[in-house]
Amino acid sequence: MTARIGVVTFPGSLDDRDTQRAIRLAGAEPVALWHKDKDLKQVDAVVLPGGFSYGDYLRAGAISRFSPVMETVIEQAKAGLPVLGICNGFQVLTEAHLLPGAMLGNNHLHFICRDQKLRVEHADTAWTSDYTAGQEIRIPLKNMDGRYVADSYTLDQLEAEGRVVFRYLDFNPNGSLRDIAGITNEAGNVVGLMPHPEHAVEPLIGTGRTDGLPFFTSILKKLVNA
Amino acid sequence: MSRTPLDTVEHAAATPDVALPWAELGLKKDEYERVVEILGRRPTGAELAMYSVMWSEHCSYKSSKVHLRQFGEKAPESDALLVGIGENAGVVDVGQGYAVTFKVESHNHPSYVEPYQGAATGVGGIVRDIIAMGARPVAVVDPLRFGAADHPDTKRVLPGVVAGIGGYGNCLGLPNIGGEVVFDPCYQGNPLVNAGCIGVMRHEDIHLAKASGAGNKVILYGARTGGDGIGGASILASETFDDAKPSKRPAVQVGDPFQEKLLIECTLEAFREKLVVGIQDLGAAGLSCATSELASNGSGGMTVVLDDVPLRDSTLSPEEILMSESQERMCAVVEPGKVDRFLEICEKWDVIATVIGEVTDGDRLEIFWHGEKIVDVDPRTVAHEGPTYERPYARPSWQDALQADDAGKLPRPETSQELKDQVLKLVASPNQASKKWITSQYDHFVQGNTVLAQPEDSGMIRIDEETGLGVAIATDGNGRYAKLDPYKGAQLALAEAYRNVATTGAKPLAVSDCLNFGSPEDPAVMWQFAEAVRGLADACQQLGTPVTGGNVSLYNQTGEAAIHPTPVVAVLGVIDDVARRTPVGFQEEGQLLYLLGDTREEFGGSAWSQVVHDHLGGLPPEVDLERERLLAEILISASRDGMIDSAHDLSDGGLVQAVVESALLGGKGARLVVPDGLDAFTFLFSESAGRAIVAVPRSEEVRFNDMCGARGLPATRIGVVDGDAVDVQGEFALSLQELREAHEATIPALLA
């Protein structure tokens, strides 16, 4: 038996198929979830993929957060369901208040696509246990609204509680406060990050690195060993 | 507000003397007279609107088609071609049951007026052409040309164009894997924004723009129809039919990539369930084009009820609805029994879909408004039987003087220091500098199948995860070469794109083109066009790569000054296993560098002559297509058999530009030795065609040399991958750091 990991497709989701492929390559079973359907099909974990859901027209993630599927995701995430939000998915998670803070437009006002160096600050979340704390990885980053912001109290709290999971190294691509690339909730089951681990899972494709694969093997091990 | 009576067919027949604004709509007197002759009466306002836009240069190719015929007449025998010229895009067999469709189009004029939306809707339009063939779009490419890099207006146009391409393409989830960015003062008032797209499908999924089967329903789906992009039709509507109306809405359309993304998914789902008989996207000329083309390609006629078209602006007149170029709309022909399911899929994706008409067993296209007939035409006369011009053309009087102004006579560097300074100046010049600031605004990774993306020689996409089957695309054009000799210039553009595809390890299969020229009413421009088409058709015939479709953009000129003739050529190739692709960057120290091909003293139109002397004259490099074919075969074999680890084609900027790019991309330097029989200057800067550099692992050297020897391809050992500098022995060394700073700082400094 392997783990079943759901990938939500919102209107305008772009990396949903890529995320399903990454889950498959890690050895788990991807399950397609539809934004209008509250049913999570009994999956063991959920990924909210990247893209421009609803065109990002109001504010990135602001409309998707109200979709029927999110009602169930929010409810179950609070009960411990592992949830990973990548890029637009991270934006949805902050809009849904499953993660603190918010995402603003990149400080240089351009879309940016690059091979981004990160440091894994904490390896004790549901999605990062196959990394080691302090490990440096490179995975693609691509976004228009990736500047993570929160008030200084929240930032201090995140730091103090070890909830800054990823930090940009060498170059801050969007002006995120304290170089924050990804964070987790108090329980460690909900993780959001701007870079795209699902684009770094095959040696031939994209940047040619597989530094993103441990996201998907981490959750698989956790679920299978649970 | 009073309205003049509706101009119905009946009314038109009864009032033959009503004067219509055909001239304002761009029709010539004899063209209007032909419309009257075809109909046997004066056209209604709606009919006039349809004919005027469908007979425009943009839609009818009236000045270019007598020349474009050569692409068909000279088309080489090719087993790969599944659908040729004439459909929305050509379709090529790439094996394993897969077919690939690709096309390049221009959106030049709108992008000058409104850079962001002009470029964005250019992407949207080409993507809909690809979906309309039944394919899932898998990548886009954008060949771009702007005025001088340091001209203030370039700073207005370029960032907007780039943001528009990114804003639209990124939001659709299409990786941007190739293209070019070229600066030249000749494009100052006429930037060239060409957009290409590749789509993939199974053979059995090919769809055509064809309405057949009486009783089948015509469904319009996607965005509501608004007043954008109406252009000429608003003259008709506001000045003739209703003086009280506000007129002159913006002629540039506004794009909504989110709507287009839904349109893609919803269309593909309908294809998967085999619900679609025929399909056409709505681009230029909107519903006029879609209905007349669908009907004329089918077996019967069509009726359309315009009242059923969902509108964004309820005050639109029927003429405006027919002309509107609102984006993100498509038209499908569906059997009656499948209409419900089709509408259900549209609803699932929140896409508005409406039955607006029906295929008939007659041969007329009839359009109704408020129950009255306002169009009654033979659709073929609208879509396919527009005027054809044999425009006069003549070799310009200045051509001889231009060719006599030999770049070989320009002063060359006399010392090693001068040579070094010129190398640094070349790699930092806007045309040769890194375009990372631009390409980093495009998503290269989405869909998770990108094997190679710019600045690699070609973009490469995996299309089958199991077998590793992939396709490659390269686009190239060199207006400077084409200005010196349009026949050879077009051939050189093809040769370069062909070579670029082969350099990455893929086999070139087919060609699409975007032919950007000045005014066809100028005999000199028409001569450039005729020569370029003849050159391209001849070269495609010789290389065995058929032209599958493309686009002509004329009137790229301000006053008397036309742009350089700029044929942009896209070559599509296939690779059996993307694991065998060859990248540009040097991979390992110690590998041996070989120069393939012959180097001659060829500097006409070269980057060196432009950067160092601001000169354009002489003759472009010689074209040897048999040599190109041999070089391609060697590059493909060497890639397949693991004999080379990196390769780079030599083109503008010559060998030194290629070595610097390979070194910077790989993060490894090179030691070069000037080969016997060449001087350092010619070795570094010549732009002789049919050449590439390759890095050969030492263990493969004998095998590689044997292969080149046996096939008769000159292969000269010129150095080794080594160190942190590009070191031309006996001349100069430039550290990678110094080169990187020079190469990467230029574009951000000018545009950021």
Image: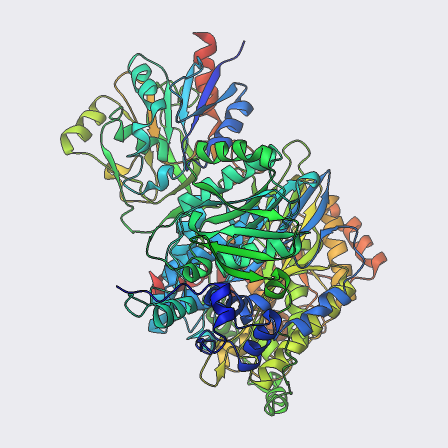
Q: Is residue B164 visible?
A: yes
* The quadrant where residue B316 appears: bottom left
Q: Closest to the observer: B630 or B4?
A: B4
Horizontal side, residue B128 vs residue B500: left or right: left
Q: Position of residue B371 (x, y in %)?
A: 45, 52
Colour scheme in the image?
Answer: rainbow
Q: Residue at (33%, 60%) from the top-left corner? A: B752
Q: Position of residue A195 (x, y in %)?
A: 39, 36
Quick one: which residue is furthest to the top in this view?
A226
Horizontal side, residue B655 vs residue A192: left or right: right
Count the marks: how many? 0
Quick one: which residue is furthest to the right in this view?
B710
* The quadrant where residue B501 appears: bottom right
Q: Closest to the observer: B241 or A145?
A: B241
Q: Residue at (24%, 35%) from the top-left corner? A: A102
Q: Closest to the observer: A125 or B336?
A: B336
Q: Position of residue B749 (x, y in %)?
A: 34, 64
Q: Residue at (55%, 19%) from the top-left corner? A: A27
Q: Is residue B41 above or below residue B705?
A: below
Q: Closest to the observer: B261 or B235?
A: B235
Horizontal side, residue B642 vs residue A35: left or right: right
Quick one: which residue is furthest to the front in this view?
B14
Q: Is residue B601 visible?
A: no
Q: Is residue B708 above or below residue B492?
A: above
Q: Position of residue B670 (x, y in %)?
A: 58, 57
The quarter of the picture where the N terminus of chain A appears is top right
Horizontal side, residue A219 vs residue B407: left or right: left
The quarter of the picture where the C terminus of chain A appears is top left
